[in-house]
Amino acid sequence: SAVISQKPSRDICQRGTSLTIQCQVDSQVTMMFWYRQQPGQSLTLIATANQGSEATYESGFVIDKFPISRPNLTFSTLTVSNMSPEDSSIYLCSVQGEAGLYGYTFGSGTRLTVV
Amino acid sequence: QKEVEQNSGPLSVPEGAIASLNCTYSDRGSQSFFWYRQYSGKSPELIMFIYSNGDKEDGRFTAQLNKASQYVSLLIRDSQPSDSATYLCAVNAGGGSNYKLTFGKGTLLTVNP
């Protein structure tokens, strides 16, 4: 299955600032996905990033808050903008894996704490 | 609103026992079903997937799917302390958004030595 490198692995940020999370895949993939996992909760899809087009955001998530770049088929970034303590979460990128079309492989995650 | 429901647990079983994890889903159009294991502080790891009604076995793991009842389960035989983790059920959205997965909140499993 694809190997995903995600960084930073964790960060502590001041409210009002922004953090950019990077996701690098060792093979070319059409779609990359960004998830959020809030403390004690399950995973929630933020957006789907396709190369060469704007990301598709899920209900409750907007581009101004979570801008995404997808410059090529192996790389994507997610920025968490104007952060507040409510943004403290684990952010995960994922790609489709070997388990058919829909079996996702996840990166190691970014644990974000906003103070 | 597509939903995936799991008992949050914790589910506690003795070492060597069978652990049974259950999941129900609301979207009848769902086609693919996944079980992920997530150790504390780690990202989810895919352990089983199933597409057809019935059972699918892989080592100590068996996934069971009943689309009529909208029910999927995971059995772990000969449970080991290393199986202690949160198990997430995930279901694909079906229809035009069939690349999306909806996750349950997970069941925390503890295997006691």
Image (cartoon, coloured by chain):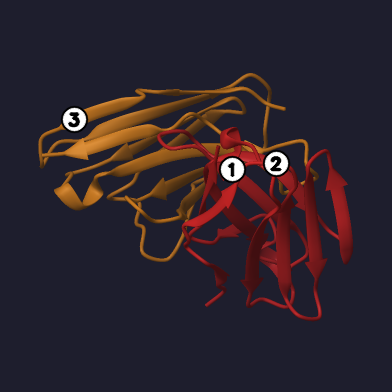
Chain colours: A orange, B red
Neighbour class for label 2 at 10 Å: few (<14), some, many (≥20)?
some
For the C terminus of chain A, the quadrant is top left
Circle 3 sits in a helix, a strand or a loop, which is it?
A: strand
User: Which callout, 3 or 1, points to the residue nearer the camera?
Assistant: 1
**The quarter of the displayed image where residue A94 is located:** top right
Neighbour class for label 3 at 10 Å: few (<14), some, many (≥20)?
few
For the N terminus of chain A, the quadrant is top right
> What residue do we see at 87% from left, 52% from top?
B56
Work out whether residue A47 or residue A84 is closer to the camera in this orientation and state it.
A84
Work out whether residue A4 or residue A76 is closer to the camera in this orientation and state it.
A4
Q: Which residue is label 3 attached to?
A: A12
Where in the figure is residue B40, as x and y percent of width and height?
A: 43, 37
Where in the figure is residue A102, as x and y percent of width and height?
A: 72, 49
The mark nearer the N terminus, 1 or 2, is: 1
Above or below, A44 relative to A19: below
Q: Which residue is label 1 attached to?
A: B37
For disc 3, the chain is A
Between the C-alphas of marks 3 and 1, the distance is 26 Å
Circle 1 sits in a helix, a strand or a loop, which is it?
A: strand
Circles 2 and 3 on the same chain: no
Amino acid found under the numbered disc labelled 3: Ile
Amino acid found under the numbered disc labelled 2: Ile
Q: Is A48 placed left or right of B76 in the picture?
A: left
Between the C-alphas of marks 2 and 3, the distance is 32 Å
> What residue do we see at 36% from left, 24% from top?
A9
Q: Which mark is residue B47?
A: 2
Between the C-alphas of marks 1 and 2, the distance is 7 Å
Above or below, B107 relative to A111: below
Work out whether residue B44 or residue A73 is closer to the camera in this orientation and state it.
B44
